[in-house]
Each structure stands twice: as structure tokens, then as C-alpha cells.
Amino acid sequence: MPTPTEHGRSDPETITLAGSRDGAPVSDRGDTVCVVGAGASGLTAVKNLAEHGFGVDCYERETGIGGAWNWRHDRSPVYASTHLISSRPFTQFPDFPMPDQWPDYPHHSQLLSYFERYADHFDLRRHVWFGTEVVRVEPAPDERWDVTTRSTGGYGPERTSRYAAVMIANGHNWSPKLPRYEGLEQFRGEVMHASSYKDPAQLRGRRVLVVGAGNTGCDIAVEAAQQASRCWHSTRRGYWYAPKYVFGRPADQVNDILLALRAPLRVRQWLYHRTLRLTVGDLTRFGLPKPDHRVYETHPIANSQLVYYVGHGAIAPTPDVGRFHPHSVELADGRQIDPDVVVFATGYLPRFEFLDAKVLGDDEGVGRPRLWLNAFVPDHPTLAVAGLVQPDSGLFTLAHWQAVLFARLLRSRATAPQRAAAFAAQVRSGAGERYAGQVKDSTRHWFEVGHADYLRALERALHDLEGK
């Protein structure tokens, strides 16, 4: 039988199981559930699975918790000035509030301390195998999963354990999406992705071109406006730039009031346009391109400073890049500029290196799984993904309820198999549904959800699963 370790986990019993990979020994973990990753989504998965009575093994490739919010981690996209873009009440876990005295938009260091306290409060570290990366996750007999791990960096032997279920929480903002441009290889200046940007000192006194108009791209452009000798900001299309405060309150809190009142989308769009006209006015007069879509059809950019620095001439808006030359960059309109550093803030693509893409319904292998509620896998009821959403508010609440739903699904497979079977049928029929209305079809918006609609869908699923 498994024996406890000093960390509170149990060492697996090692036996050779039928159906194991190449007949290699497999450690049978019984009804234990595996969680991949100890970031925000992984921690809440561990916490909720444990609360529902499951043994949990969580594998974390780094030596600490926090995932993307721990900027000491190799894969963290966090830079020195990173703050939340959703306000504190709409970001925190529903059962563990952030301190009232914290600012509306906490700094990344505060977020990491929040996760540390969350892990300590719920005694989660005893479930986590730090410095251990997942190499493979493969289907096993009886809807179980063989999970192969090794020490991070490839040192030491691999070990395979068989689990009753797996929840993937490895994050989707760590694998850079890099654009391709003619002549880029011959460009003599420095080229970096935003994932390598950590401090404005990297831009000080330099001529900087920032490519990309997401929240990160706008943040870096603002820092370049303060530190660089010159800053160009290249965007493919026009975007809506939302101030972080509206009517003296965080913008997402004002928007949530309208959502709670079930205000129609057209009404919310009209109010948003009206607010922008009264605050920042017509952005095209600053040289910013006019948006080719209505608000809420792409993720609004939460940045109160970009327009300020554009208006002061510290940021020069430019169109998309056409091609690169050895000492210059040619823009789509034919103009040429001469940056000595280019920052591609062009986003990330989700990667599940340890799992066959077809298992998640990603038949083309492009990083876009076909899931129900962005979490549940057709034909694999014991596999789920946590945190693969891009909400119009905070993520942690959504990840919490995803984990609760998965834990109750696993429990119902033993206590209420008919309801669990009905849930599985719903997953198969509803995979690929959207929860964000009409949005642009781009990789940046693959996982877009409106948090109010998404939470209602999770609530309905929980009630159906519990027969309410």
C-alpha cells in the first residue's frame, strides 16, 4: 500500500499494469487525480478536488507556485510594471478574497503573495511535486490516464503513474506567437518577443518599435514613451481603448452592473461609445486607425495612458509592418522607420506538448482544442482543462468553478452514473460553443468569453449534474 511522505503525499505503489507503455512499470495511483501546473488555475484545481475527497498529485515544472504570475519562472510573461487589468473584486477566488486595503489593480508581486497565502491557507503544497515536468499524458484502460514525469530539464529517469483523471492547468500565455515578415532575418537591430521584456531599462535611450495592440503591447509602448528616445506603435487595425476608471469606478465594475441588469449588447455598446466620446473623444485625430468592428467584438484594451502619450507625441501610431530591411522597417503604407529594437507583443498560443492534440479535438494541431465550456473534452470524461479562457473580467473565479464542476462530475460517476452520462452527452453535443457573442476570428479571441454568460453556463451545468 502507498505510504505517507514527509510532504503529506503518498509514494505510489509500483506495479506493471496491463496496457502500460511498452510494458514499462506503472505506478497505480488508484482514485487519485493528476493536476498539471501549480499556477492560479492549477492551485484552485488542487484545492477543489481535495475538498471533494480526491487524492491529488500536482506536477509543477518550476520550484515555486504562481505560474505566469511568478516572474522568476522561465516561462513567465510578467514584466516589472505588470498590474491586473481586471479589478480586484472581479479577479479574486470566490472563497478567498484579496485584502480590502489592496489597490483596485494590484501589482504582480501582490498577486504572487496572494497565491502563496491561498496555498498556505488550504494546505496545498503537500500535493505538489515541484521541479517535475509532465512529459506525456496518454489514455489508459477504463478511462484512466498514464502520466509520465521527470525532473525539469530532462535530468533523471522518467516515471509513469496511472491516474483516475487529469486536469490540465499549464496556462496559455507562455508559448510566444511570433509573426513572419519578409526580410526579418536580415534585420540588424535587436528583435524580441514581449515574453523577453522584463524592465523598461531594456528600452532606455533606444529607438523602439512595438508591434501589437494587446494590453501588453500598449503597456510596453507606454513605457517606451517614457524611456526610449523614440517610440513607434504598429497595429494591424483600430482598437477600442478603454480607460481603467469610468465614473470614478473600475471600468469592469461599471460594465458588470449593466450585465447584471441584463442590458442588451446594443445598449451596452451605445453606452460605451457615448462614454468614450465624452472622455477621450475621436481617436482618429491622434493618428490612431478607426476600429473596423463594434466594441465588445474584440477584447477592449484596458489602458488609460496610451492615448495620453499619443496625444503628447511620445508614441507615434503606425500601420502594420510591411517588411524588414537590414537597417530599417518598411510599413504597409510605404513609409520607412529606423528602430534599433523591435518588440513583438503578438501574443501567445496554447501548447499541450505532453498530449496528442487530437485527444483535445485539435485535429489540425494549431492549438485550438474543441472543448465544451472551454474545459471539458468530448469522449474523454475524465480529462479537463482549467483556465483556457480569455474573459472580459478576472480569470480566477471562472477557473474555480471549472474545477468545482470537474470534481463533482468525477464524484457523480460513482454516485449518480446516469447524470454523469447525460453530462457526457452534453459535452459531446456542445463542444465548440462560444460564450462571447460576436467576436473577431483571430487567435487572440479563440478563448474569449463574457464572464456573466459563462458563469451562468457553469451554474446550469452544476444544477443539471446535481439533478436540481
Image (cartoon, grey):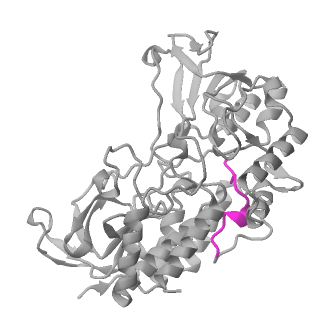
Residue 193 as seen in the image, left or right of residue 204:
left
Residue 85 position in % (x across, y down): 69, 52
Q: Is residue 39 visible?
A: yes
Q: Residue furthest left?
A: 23
Q: Quarter holding the N terminus?
A: bottom left
Magenta segment boundaries in residue numbering: 82-94
Name which residue lies at 60% across and 68% down. Answer: 455
Name the side, left or right, on which 90 lies relative to 149: right
Looking at the image, is 171 positioned above or below residue 166? above
52 over 400 or under it: above or below: below
Query: What is the chief secondary structure element of the magenta stretch?
Result: loop
Residue shown at 9%/66% (left/top)? Answer: 23
65 or 212, which is in the foreground?
212
| Location of residue 225 in the rendering, given as x and y in whole percent from the top left corner | 75, 29
Q: Does residue 37 appear to the left or right of 439 in the view shown?
A: left
**Vertical order, 461 against 412 (above or below):** above
How many labels, in total? 0
- Quarter of the figure with residue 233: top right
- Is 88 in the magenta? yes
Figure check: 464 above or below 151: below
Residue 246 is situated, as x and y percent measured from the top left of the image, at: 85, 51
Measuring 55% from the left and 45% from the top, which residue is drawn there?
445
Image coords of residue 27 (percent x, y): 21, 75
